[in-house]
Amino acid sequence: MARGTSEILEFYSGRSVFLTGGTGCVGKAIIEKLLRGCPKVRNIYVLVRDKRGVSAQQRLEILLHEPLFSPVQAALPNVLGKVKPIIGDITMPGLGIGSDDLSLLRETVSVIIHSAATVKFDEALKLAMNINVGGTLRVLELAKSMELIQAVIYVSTAFSNCERAFIEEKVYPVSIEPQKALEQCERLHHDWNVKEKLAGLLGDKPNAYTLTKHLAEEVINQAHQNTSLPVCIVRPSIVAAAYTEPIPGYVDNYNGASGLLIGVLTGAIHTLLLNDEYKIDIIPLDYTVNAILAAAANLGMDGKGSSIQVYNLTSYKNPFVIPRILNSAKKSFFGRPFKNIVWYPTLHVTSSYLKFRLMNFFVHKIPAHLMDTLLGLRGGKKRFVRIYNKLWNNFGIVRYFCTRKWEFQTGNSTVLFESLSPEDQLRFPFLPCHINWDTYIYFYIQGLRKYTLKDEGDVKEAQRTVQKFQILHQLFTFLPLLPLIFALILVVTEFRPV
């Protein structure tokens, strides 16, 4: 990438971008950063479908009025008109796009960012294959017909090869051709067939999500090898709240680390099973977006190379270590706690599965049944056993990722960042080594409270609620010790010298 004032801004100036997955967490943030950070972008075309009686146009208008877009609305209100809906569906032939829109895209788009995916770890194989693999094939077919195409970016995941302990920045061989796997899944109709086929395809992979993301990477790799399309892959790890922009700590969903933090800070989760280093690999939302936009600009300016570029975007070298972060989390939470908590927040982290099961029984299961019994006696609706059953089921889905450790090669990401001009390094930061996790977690928790939980309640009232639960927690912690204390008093009294 050439050196200059801001090559990234210059690259996007006057060019149009086609985005899939634009209504998702990463997709929305890409739209926002393009509008605010690259205001001379020509147009942003977003693939969007009608959903639950809401038209594609209405969905896009609602999206652009979310809090995420407040800064750009205030600073550059006119640029919002550059976001255009393309009515379609990632699962449909030809992406379900009408002929007029197809002509428009083919004649004007220079950059494709393919972010659409099902990210559910327990997604059904057939649907995951159709969206993640079939959707990628359909996007590439469209890209081949575009007159001005300069970059096609596939947003994958750092865990697409999670069965490996060390993950390089390359596309690993697949056990089955993506097209063949897709065709096999399209013929499945019965549950027992799906389960049988899934077991045969997974190999060492834990679920259909990681399998289909790996297969989609191979689709991109084959496009690099067999066509003239300029393609590359960006692999973020667990995408979490924004670090600095557009709003520090911005997050509006319960996915990944956000659901975990909410569970802990509302007093629903009191024990956690992690790898023996207590690390979780997360990457801020804004860093993810910056890396994607930088990768697209780099590919567009430098052109297609001999080998496909893969960028691992992970915090492996600057890890998010749970026990170390807890103190900062406590300061943020207790300064401005959540209004609706179910118990006083405490957390015990362990790498022992046996210890975790025992802790889960005593601090989750028993209290849940006790609380539901009390609610039943008072005529209230029982809910705690249901909550903890759901938490336990969810843990079963993510256990694989909580208890393992990975090393990631990140040389390509580092080289990409270092190739940016000094101004672009300031405008589009994405190296995780620059993250101060204490600062990050402080704003993350405030973002969860404001944007995810939409908790704008009285802070003093929330603090009083926490204090009440703290007293109850201390009481319940102390009660089991009463028989022991009573016995000690009896012993001391019995043998007291006369």
Image: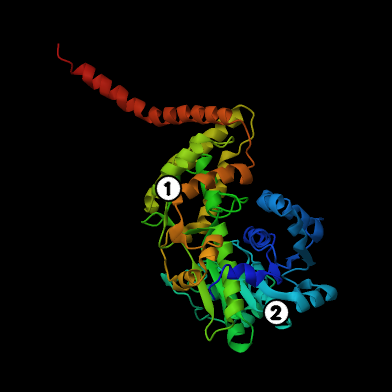
Q: Is residue 214 above or below residue 145?
A: above
Q: Residue at x 18, y 18 (%)?
A: 495
Residue 212 in sight from this viewpoint: no
User: Please, what is the three-letter code of the amino acid marked with disc 2?
Assistant: Ala
Q: Is residue 491 above or below residue 293?
A: above
Q: Between residues 310 and 81, which one lies in front from this camera angle?
A: 81
Q: Residue at x 78, y 68 (%)?
A: 88
Graded by Cα atoms within 10 Å as few (under 14), some (14 to 19) or many (20 or more), the crowding at tag 2 reads: many
Viewed as shown, does residue 417 lie left or right of 32?
left
Q: Quadrant of the N terminus?
A: bottom right
Place residue 134 in its image quadrant: bottom right
Residue at mark 2? 143
Q: Residue furthest bottom?
A: 226
Q: Residue at x 60, y 72 (%)?
A: 296
Query: Could you say where residue 385 lies in the image, as x and y percent from the top left?
Result: 56, 41
User: Please, what is the three-letter code of the amino acid marked with disc 1?
Assistant: Ile
Q: Between residues 192 and 346, which one lies in front from this camera angle?
A: 346
Viewed as shown, does residue 360 lie left or right of 293?
left
**What is the basis of the colouring in this image?**
rainbow
Number of the label disc, if any, that sits on residue 325: 1
